[in-house]
Amino acid sequence: MFSAADLIVAPATPAGAGLRAIVRLAGDGLEHPLRTLFDADPPGFAAAGDTPRVVTGRLNPSGLGRAWGPLAVEILHWPGPAGPLGGPLAEVQLPASAALVAAVLDEACRHGCRLARGGEFTLRAFLAGRLDLVQAETVLAVVDATTSEELSAALDRMAAGAGGRLAAVRSEVLDLVADVEAAIDFADEATPDAVPVGPEWRSVSARVAACDAGIAQVTERLADRDAAAADLPRVVIAGPPNVGKSSLFNALTGRPAALVADEIGTTRDWLEATLGDDSGPRCLLVDVAGIHAAGETGDAVTATAEARAREQLERADLVVFCQDSVQGGGVPVPVRAQRVDVTTRSDLVHHVQPGERVTSSLTGAGIQGLRHEILAAVARLPPRGSPATARLAVGCAAARRSLAAALATVDGAAAGSVDEAIVAGHLRRAAEELAEITGDSITTDLLDRLFSRHCIGK
């Protein structure tokens, strides 16, 4: 289990070209590494209990400054206990040099810090009550987003406050538990002149139904947002120019959607069509312009078409790489995408290499087999929905089942007495299941599993 007191450090921006890089430090005793690494301009770093401030300064001339010179830095300093993590936190903004970032990390570790584990900053925010568990998990969805739609849905989910709404429902469920259990504890204390202490079951039924409706509203709203982002898996047909990609696209989809011609560069933009039906896996089949070998150039229109093709390749979940039976050829494929290799226009040759996957859009040879192979590969792809939403849906479904059991017990006893202990038990389970969603009750092992999926620096 992570300790919120440890001094930790990590880069908070991805490696690569950019204007600025951010290094994040946090933990008790943060002042020591900050003052060792950086010279701060007046008024200097904030003291514990002060309001957060932006500190300007430079690399310490007796430390990093000896090798890097007096480089200017800006530091967002939260001294604690106020702030995103509930404790000391600093975000150092400096020039985006991979070597400089590595040097700052190394120097910080030499002065008491350790490299943060994946998700450790987000975990501290959760433990400090700055994020509920639904929001904390959504950080991972933001990091993992590969399209603008996925990013928009993840940011929307983070800002929607689903955890807060579920916490309010849980509070009402706990009030219900208290009311029902009061009827058990004081059932024998009613006198002929006293108002009965047993709950008004019609009111209890309405309150349980309202709690169920509140949970349903949260899950439906989040599911709709995830569905908008988690569109069908994208299967991109790629390869060199004029190897029969568009003909293969038409053959697989069963309709002449793509323009086909012998001239190189017929495809200028990308086309989409759905492959599969509602009875099985489905995907979005994408036909893109041909991609030239390294060093080959074309006119401006061709270059633009190829750039769009590469964008589609980066979004692909699966790439069908076409190699012409006569010409051969090759194209770079994104590492993250799975790949199916196929040889097109097999009707033009008489001999096929052993194990070679061949197709002919003219004769139909191999088309049905390739279609089945694509859909089978799509079926094996991991779910595109957010893990946070999946866990929330499972927990909410369990809570709703417990509420339904409580409601059935209450409504089913209209002709007789209600067993308060059974109703209270169902309600208590619903409250426990909601607590696991929001993080009010969760094991340390589960916390480790949830937050270890986050990248370092988050």
Image (cartoon, grey):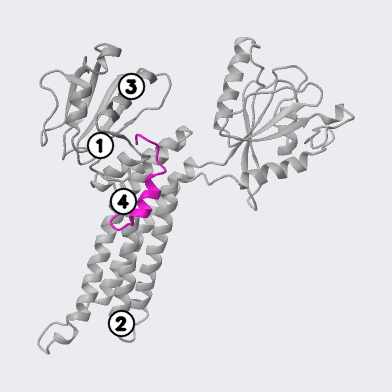
Amino acid type of the residue tagged 4 in the rendering:
Gly
Which residue type carries mark 3?
A: Ala
Measured in 3D between alpha carbons, the distance from the residue under mark 3 to the one under mark 4, in whole angstroms, is 39 Å
In magenta segment, residue 98: no
Q: Is residue 285 above or below residue 381?
A: above
In the displayed structure image, the side of residue 56 where residue 365 appears, left or right? right
User: Counting other residues with Cα less than 10 Å from the Cα at mark 2, is it few (<14), some (14-19), or many (20 or more)?
Assistant: some
Rendered residue at 71%/38% (across/down): 253
Q: Which mark is residue 90?
A: none
Q: Which kind of residue does numbered mark 2 sit on?
A: Val
The alpha-carbon separation of the residues under discs 2 and 3 comes to 69 Å
At 57% from the left and 22% from the top, the residue drawn is 308
Q: Earlier in the sequence, mark 4 or mark 1?
A: 1
Secondary structure at badge 4 equals: helix
Label 2: which residue? 418
Q: Do the residues under discs 2 and 3 have CB atoms within 8 angstroms? A: no
Which tag, 1 or 3, sits closer to the chain's start? 1
State the mark number for residue 163.
Answer: 4
The overriding secondary structure of the stretch rendered in magenta is: loop
Image depth: mark 2 or mark 4 in front? 4
The mark that comes first in sequence, 3 or 4, is 3
Q: Which residue is more in the foreground, 269 or 71?
A: 71
The magenta segment: 439-458
Distance CA(mark 2)–CA(mark 1):
56 Å
Nearest to the observer: residue 265 or residue 18 = 18
First in residue order: circle 2 vs circle 1: 1
Mark found first going from the N terminus, 2 or 3:
3
